[in-house]
Image: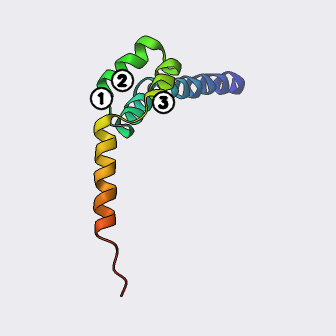
Amino acid sequence: MILSQLTCMEQIFGSILGITIIIFILFILPISMAKKRGRNPVGWTILFWILTPFWGAILLLILGDSKKKIKQDILDEINNNQHPPTYE
């Protein structure tokens, strides 16, 4: 009786863990990677589904940041250098 209950609980835990991993790979990973690089999260999520997450991630890593994000990073760096911190 106890053995069959543990097996059932293990199956439930395994199912929940599997679903969590799938959600992470198919939704959270592409969205976070795309946002970090200044790219469209919805488009990259769909591309992850089409290409498989592995190839989608490789492609996103190869392409790197978008031009818009690079420009914004440069402007942020210029603004930070123009206003150095003051020490009292």
Does residue 22 appear in the picture of this structure? Answer: no
- Residue 80 is left or right of residue 61, and the answer is left
Point out the frontmost of discs 2 and 3. 3
Q: Dot 2 lies on which element?
A: helix
Q: CA distance from mark 3 to mark 1?
A: 14 Å
Kind of residue at disc 3: Leu
Residue denoted by label 2: 44
Q: Between residue 26 and residue 39, name the one nearer to us.
A: 39
Q: If you read the primary sequence from the N terminus, does the residue marked by circle 3 or circle 1 appear first?
A: 1
**Residue at the spot of label 3:** 61
Q: Nearer the viewer, mark 3 or mark 1?
A: 3
Quarter of the image for residue 76 reads bottom left
According to the image, label 1 marks what residue? 40
Evaluate whether residue 35 shows in this view.
Answer: yes
What separation in Å lies between label 1 and label 2 (alpha carbons)?
Answer: 6 Å
Dot 3 crowding, Cα within 10 Å, few <14, some 14–19, many 20+:
few
* Residue type marked 1: Asn
Q: Residue at x 55, y 28 (%)?
A: 17
Kindly identify the residue that appears in the image at 32 percent across and 31 percent down: 39
- Quarter of the image where the C terminus is located: bottom left
Q: Amino acid at mark 2?
A: Trp
Mark 2 surroundings: few (<14), some (14-19) or many (≥20) residues within 10 A:
many
Identify which residue, 51 or 19, lies in the foreground: 51
Provide residue 19's location: percent of width, then percent of height.
49, 24
Dot 1: what SS?
loop
Residue 17 or residue 11, whichever sits in front: 17
